[in-house]
Image (spheres, helix red, strand yellow):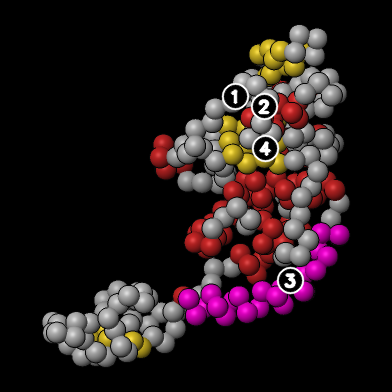
Amino acid sequence: MKGPHGGGKSTTLSIVGHTLFPVSGSVFVPAHLRILSVAENNMIFESWTPFENLAFGLSKDQISEELPRIRKILERLGMNRVLAMVESDLREPTVSVTPITITQNLNPEGSNLSENRPLISPRTLSRECSVRSVTISVNREESMLKDNSTLEEKREHSAGWFQAFSSTELSKFCLARALIANSEILILHKPFTSFEDEAKEQVARSLHEHVRSRGMALPTDTLIMRRPRTCFYSVVDPADVKWSDTVWRIDVKTKSIYVEEPGPKPDPTTPRKRGR
Protein backbone atom coordinates (compact mmCIF):
# COMPACT_ATOMS: atom_id res chain seq x y z
CA MET A 1 0.00 0.00 0.00
CA LYS A 2 1.40 3.37 -1.01
CA GLY A 3 0.26 6.96 -0.72
CA PRO A 4 1.31 10.36 0.61
CA HIS A 5 2.32 10.93 4.21
CA GLY A 6 -0.82 11.21 6.31
CA GLY A 7 -2.92 9.80 3.48
CA GLY A 8 -4.37 6.95 5.53
CA LYS A 9 -2.10 3.96 4.89
CA SER A 10 -1.77 3.00 8.54
CA THR A 11 -5.47 3.64 9.18
CA THR A 12 -6.50 1.41 6.29
CA LEU A 13 -4.22 -1.43 7.37
CA SER A 14 -5.43 -1.08 10.96
CA ILE A 15 -9.02 -1.48 9.75
CA VAL A 16 -8.10 -4.56 7.71
CA GLY A 17 -6.29 -5.95 10.75
CA HIS A 18 -9.25 -5.29 13.07
CA THR A 19 -7.15 -3.12 15.39
CA LEU A 20 -9.29 -0.16 14.34
CA PHE A 21 -12.97 -0.27 13.41
CA PRO A 22 -14.64 2.02 10.85
CA VAL A 23 -17.39 4.46 11.78
CA SER A 24 -19.40 3.32 8.76
CA GLY A 25 -19.09 0.31 6.50
CA SER A 26 -17.32 -2.90 7.44
CA VAL A 27 -14.42 -5.17 6.60
CA PHE A 28 -15.18 -8.89 6.68
CA VAL A 29 -12.49 -11.38 7.58
CA PRO A 30 -13.55 -15.02 8.14
CA ALA A 31 -13.35 -15.95 11.80
CA HIS A 32 -11.14 -18.97 11.17
CA LEU A 33 -8.33 -16.81 9.77
CA ARG A 34 -5.79 -15.50 12.24
CA ILE A 35 -4.68 -11.88 11.83
CA LEU A 36 -1.37 -10.59 13.11
CA SER A 37 -0.29 -6.94 12.90
CA VAL A 38 3.29 -5.75 13.30
CA ALA A 39 3.49 -2.07 14.21
CA GLU A 40 6.11 0.33 12.93
CA ASN A 41 7.45 0.79 16.46
CA ASN A 42 9.30 -2.22 17.86
CA MET A 43 7.42 -4.00 20.62
CA ILE A 44 9.55 -6.03 23.04
CA PHE A 45 8.54 -7.66 26.32
CA GLU A 46 11.39 -6.27 28.36
CA SER A 47 11.01 -8.60 31.36
CA TRP A 48 10.98 -11.71 29.15
CA THR A 49 13.90 -13.68 27.76
CA PRO A 50 14.73 -13.45 24.02
CA PHE A 51 13.21 -16.88 23.41
CA GLU A 52 10.00 -16.01 25.25
CA ASN A 53 9.68 -12.96 22.99
CA LEU A 54 10.22 -15.03 19.85
CA ALA A 55 7.78 -17.75 20.89
CA PHE A 56 5.02 -15.30 21.81
CA GLY A 57 1.99 -16.41 19.80
CA LEU A 58 2.72 -20.13 20.11
CA SER A 59 1.00 -22.38 22.61
CA LYS A 60 3.06 -24.44 25.05
CA ASP A 61 2.21 -27.56 23.07
CA GLN A 62 3.48 -25.99 19.85
CA ILE A 63 6.83 -24.73 21.11
CA SER A 64 8.64 -28.07 21.26
CA GLU A 65 7.44 -28.98 17.77
CA GLU A 66 8.41 -25.58 16.34
CA LEU A 67 12.01 -25.48 17.61
CA PRO A 68 13.62 -26.61 14.30
CA ARG A 69 11.44 -24.15 12.38
CA ILE A 70 12.35 -21.26 14.71
CA ARG A 71 16.02 -22.00 14.08
CA LYS A 72 15.54 -21.99 10.30
CA ILE A 73 13.68 -18.66 10.35
CA LEU A 74 16.43 -17.01 12.39
CA GLU A 75 19.08 -18.41 10.06
CA ARG A 76 17.32 -17.21 6.90
CA LEU A 77 16.93 -13.74 8.36
CA GLY A 78 20.62 -13.68 9.23
CA MET A 79 19.96 -13.23 12.95
CA ASN A 80 23.16 -14.85 14.21
CA ARG A 81 23.34 -12.83 17.44
CA VAL A 82 19.84 -13.86 18.41
CA LEU A 83 20.59 -17.48 17.50
CA ALA A 84 23.52 -17.46 19.91
CA MET A 85 21.32 -16.07 22.68
CA VAL A 86 18.57 -18.68 22.30
CA GLU A 87 20.78 -21.67 21.43
CA SER A 88 20.09 -23.41 24.74
CA ASP A 89 16.33 -22.92 24.29
CA LEU A 90 16.41 -24.39 20.78
CA ARG A 91 17.92 -27.67 21.90
CA GLU A 92 15.42 -30.51 22.02
CA PRO A 93 14.78 -31.45 25.66
CA THR A 94 15.74 -35.04 26.41
CA VAL A 95 13.03 -36.53 28.59
CA SER A 96 13.18 -40.18 29.60
CA VAL A 97 9.77 -41.67 30.30
CA THR A 98 9.32 -44.92 32.17
CA PRO A 99 6.16 -46.91 31.33
CA ILE A 100 3.45 -46.48 33.94
CA THR A 101 3.03 -49.45 36.23
CA ILE A 102 -0.39 -50.10 37.74
CA THR A 103 -0.13 -51.56 41.25
CA GLN A 104 -3.90 -51.85 41.69
CA ASN A 105 -6.65 -52.78 39.28
CA LEU A 106 -8.30 -49.89 37.42
CA ASN A 107 -11.76 -51.28 38.12
CA PRO A 108 -12.44 -52.01 41.77
CA GLU A 109 -15.05 -54.58 40.71
CA GLY A 110 -12.58 -56.57 38.68
CA SER A 111 -10.33 -56.07 35.69
CA ASN A 112 -8.39 -58.17 33.25
CA LEU A 113 -5.22 -56.19 34.12
CA SER A 114 -2.96 -58.15 36.41
CA GLU A 115 -1.00 -56.42 39.15
CA ASN A 116 2.34 -54.84 38.26
CA ARG A 117 1.64 -55.13 34.56
CA PRO A 118 3.15 -52.16 32.69
CA LEU A 119 0.98 -50.37 30.19
CA ILE A 120 2.18 -50.43 26.60
CA SER A 121 1.74 -46.67 26.14
CA PRO A 122 3.49 -44.40 28.68
CA ARG A 123 0.74 -41.88 29.33
CA THR A 124 0.09 -39.55 32.20
CA LEU A 125 -3.25 -40.62 33.66
CA SER A 126 -5.87 -37.96 34.41
CA ARG A 127 -7.24 -37.32 37.86
CA GLU A 128 -10.55 -38.89 36.90
CA CYS A 129 -8.95 -42.34 36.57
CA SER A 130 -9.82 -44.80 39.35
CA VAL A 131 -6.21 -45.51 40.24
CA ARG A 132 -4.95 -45.49 43.80
CA SER A 133 -1.27 -46.10 43.18
CA VAL A 134 0.66 -45.25 40.05
CA THR A 135 4.44 -45.43 39.78
CA ILE A 136 6.09 -42.98 37.38
CA SER A 137 9.83 -42.37 37.52
CA VAL A 138 10.10 -39.41 35.15
CA ASN A 139 7.40 -37.87 32.96
CA ARG A 140 7.07 -34.82 30.77
CA GLU A 141 5.10 -32.81 33.31
CA GLU A 142 7.86 -33.21 35.91
CA SER A 143 10.40 -32.11 33.33
CA MET A 144 8.33 -29.03 32.49
CA LEU A 145 8.08 -28.11 36.17
CA LYS A 146 11.83 -28.47 36.50
CA ASP A 147 12.38 -26.20 33.50
CA ASN A 148 9.90 -23.63 34.80
CA SER A 149 11.75 -23.45 38.11
CA THR A 150 14.71 -21.90 36.28
CA LEU A 151 12.63 -19.47 34.23
CA GLU A 152 13.08 -16.60 36.67
CA GLU A 153 16.81 -17.26 36.68
CA LYS A 154 16.89 -17.09 32.87
CA ARG A 155 14.96 -13.83 32.92
CA GLU A 156 17.31 -12.36 35.49
CA HIS A 157 20.37 -13.51 33.55
CA SER A 158 19.09 -12.03 30.26
CA ALA A 159 17.71 -8.79 31.73
CA GLY A 160 18.28 -5.86 29.41
CA TRP A 161 19.32 -8.07 26.47
CA PHE A 162 17.45 -5.86 24.00
CA GLN A 163 19.56 -2.82 24.88
CA ALA A 164 22.50 -4.33 22.99
CA PHE A 165 20.50 -4.38 19.74
CA SER A 166 20.05 -1.56 17.28
CA SER A 167 16.63 -0.41 16.15
CA THR A 168 17.19 -2.21 12.84
CA GLU A 169 17.98 -5.50 14.59
CA LEU A 170 14.91 -5.17 16.81
CA SER A 171 12.77 -4.55 13.71
CA LYS A 172 14.01 -7.84 12.27
CA PHE A 173 13.38 -9.50 15.64
CA CYS A 174 9.73 -8.43 15.59
CA LEU A 175 9.40 -9.65 12.00
CA ALA A 176 10.86 -13.04 12.97
CA ARG A 177 8.34 -13.34 15.80
CA ALA A 178 5.50 -12.68 13.35
CA LEU A 179 6.79 -15.29 10.88
CA ILE A 180 7.14 -17.83 13.69
CA ALA A 181 3.52 -17.21 14.76
CA ASN A 182 2.55 -18.03 11.15
CA SER A 183 -0.85 -16.32 10.88
CA GLU A 184 -2.94 -16.52 7.72
CA ILE A 185 -3.10 -12.73 7.43
CA LEU A 186 0.03 -10.75 8.20
CA ILE A 187 -0.11 -6.94 8.31
CA LEU A 188 3.16 -5.01 8.39
CA HIS A 189 3.35 -1.27 8.92
CA LYS A 190 6.32 0.12 6.95
CA PRO A 191 8.45 -3.03 7.30
CA PHE A 192 11.27 -1.87 4.97
CA THR A 193 11.90 1.53 6.55
CA SER A 194 14.70 0.40 8.86
CA PHE A 195 16.67 -1.63 6.32
CA GLU A 196 19.27 -1.00 3.64
CA ASP A 197 18.97 -2.62 0.20
CA GLU A 198 20.59 -5.95 1.10
CA ALA A 199 18.51 -6.37 4.25
CA LYS A 200 15.37 -5.35 2.34
CA GLU A 201 15.94 -8.20 -0.08
CA GLN A 202 16.44 -10.59 2.82
CA VAL A 203 13.15 -9.50 4.36
CA ALA A 204 11.39 -9.65 0.97
CA ARG A 205 12.57 -13.24 0.40
CA SER A 206 11.22 -14.22 3.82
CA LEU A 207 7.82 -12.65 3.15
CA HIS A 208 7.79 -14.23 -0.30
CA GLU A 209 8.37 -17.67 1.22
CA HIS A 210 5.74 -17.07 3.90
CA VAL A 211 3.10 -16.36 1.23
CA ARG A 212 4.13 -18.85 -1.46
CA SER A 213 4.82 -21.74 0.91
CA ARG A 214 1.89 -20.94 3.20
CA GLY A 215 4.20 -20.53 6.13
CA MET A 216 7.96 -20.06 6.36
CA ALA A 217 10.29 -23.04 6.85
CA LEU A 218 7.51 -25.60 6.59
CA PRO A 219 7.67 -28.90 4.64
CA THR A 220 6.56 -28.64 1.02
CA ASP A 221 4.79 -32.01 1.04
CA THR A 222 2.11 -30.64 3.39
CA LEU A 223 1.66 -27.32 1.59
CA ILE A 224 -1.68 -28.32 0.06
CA MET A 225 -3.05 -29.01 3.56
CA ARG A 226 -2.31 -25.49 4.80
CA ARG A 227 -4.45 -22.38 4.36
CA PRO A 228 -3.19 -19.65 2.01
CA ARG A 229 -1.22 -16.76 3.46
CA THR A 230 -1.71 -13.08 2.66
CA CYS A 231 0.62 -10.24 3.56
CA PHE A 232 -0.35 -6.54 3.54
CA TYR A 233 2.33 -3.92 4.00
CA SER A 234 2.69 -0.16 3.66
CA VAL A 235 5.71 1.66 2.23
CA VAL A 236 7.43 5.01 2.62
CA ASP A 237 9.64 4.61 -0.45
CA PRO A 238 7.39 3.93 -3.49
CA ALA A 239 10.16 1.74 -4.92
CA ASP A 240 9.51 -0.83 -2.19
CA VAL A 241 6.23 -1.87 -3.81
CA LYS A 242 8.30 -3.88 -6.31
CA TRP A 243 8.18 -6.85 -3.95
CA SER A 244 4.37 -7.04 -3.98
CA ASP A 245 1.92 -8.84 -6.27
CA THR A 246 -0.66 -6.04 -6.13
CA VAL A 247 -0.38 -2.35 -5.24
CA TRP A 248 -3.09 -0.35 -3.50
CA ARG A 249 -2.64 3.38 -4.04
CA ILE A 250 -4.49 5.83 -1.80
CA ASP A 251 -5.79 8.97 -3.49
CA VAL A 252 -6.27 11.65 -0.84
CA LYS A 253 -8.35 13.96 -3.07
CA THR A 254 -10.96 11.36 -4.00
CA LYS A 255 -10.53 9.41 -0.75
CA SER A 256 -10.36 6.24 -2.78
CA ILE A 257 -8.07 3.25 -3.18
CA TYR A 258 -6.93 2.27 -6.66
CA VAL A 259 -5.39 -1.04 -7.67
CA GLU A 260 -2.17 -0.89 -9.68
CA GLU A 261 0.33 -3.37 -11.02
CA PRO A 262 3.74 -3.24 -9.32
CA GLY A 263 5.53 -3.57 -12.64
CA PRO A 264 8.70 -5.63 -13.23
CA LYS A 265 10.18 -6.89 -10.02
CA PRO A 266 13.18 -8.99 -9.04
CA ASP A 267 12.73 -12.60 -8.04
CA PRO A 268 12.88 -12.59 -4.22
CA THR A 269 14.06 -16.21 -4.20
CA THR A 270 17.30 -15.20 -5.95
CA PRO A 271 19.75 -13.25 -3.79
CA ARG A 272 21.33 -10.23 -5.42
CA LYS A 273 24.97 -10.65 -6.41
CA ARG A 274 27.34 -8.36 -4.60
CA GLY A 275 29.67 -6.19 -6.60
CA ARG A 276 33.37 -6.26 -6.03
Give the amino acid at mark 1: Ser
Q: Is 184 placed left or right of 206 in the picture?
A: left
**Marks 2 and 1 close (CB-CB < 8 Å):** yes
- The mark nearer the N terminus, 3 or 2, is 2
Give the amino acid at mark 4: Thr
Q: Marks 3/4: CA distance?
A: 30 Å
- The mark nearer the N terminus, 4 or 1, is 4
Quarter occupied by the N terminus: top right
Q: Marks 4/1: CA distance?
A: 13 Å
As helix, strand or loop, the secondary structure at mark 4 comes to: loop
Residue found 78% across the figure and 61% down from its top: 46
Label 4: how many Cα within 10 Å (few below 14, some 14–19, many 20+): few
As helix, strand or loop, the secondary structure at mark 2 comes to: loop
Q: What residue is pinned by disc 4? A: 19
> Can residue 187 be seen by looking at this rendering?
no
Q: Marks 3/2: CA distance?
A: 40 Å
Residue found 67% across the figure and 26% down from its top: 22
Q: Marks 4/2: CA distance?
A: 10 Å
In the drawing, what numbered circle is on residue 22? 2
The residue nearer to you, when weighing 72 against 48, is: 48
Label 1: how many Cα within 10 Å (few below 14, some 14–19, many 20+): few
- The mark nearer the N terminus, 3 or 1, is 1
In the drawing, what numbered circle is on residue 26? 1
Q: What residue is pinned by disc 3? A: 155
Residue 154 included in the magenta stretch of the image: yes
As helix, strand or loop, the secondary structure at mark 3 comes to: helix
> Can residue 185 be seen by looking at this rendering?
yes
The span picked out in magenta is 141-164
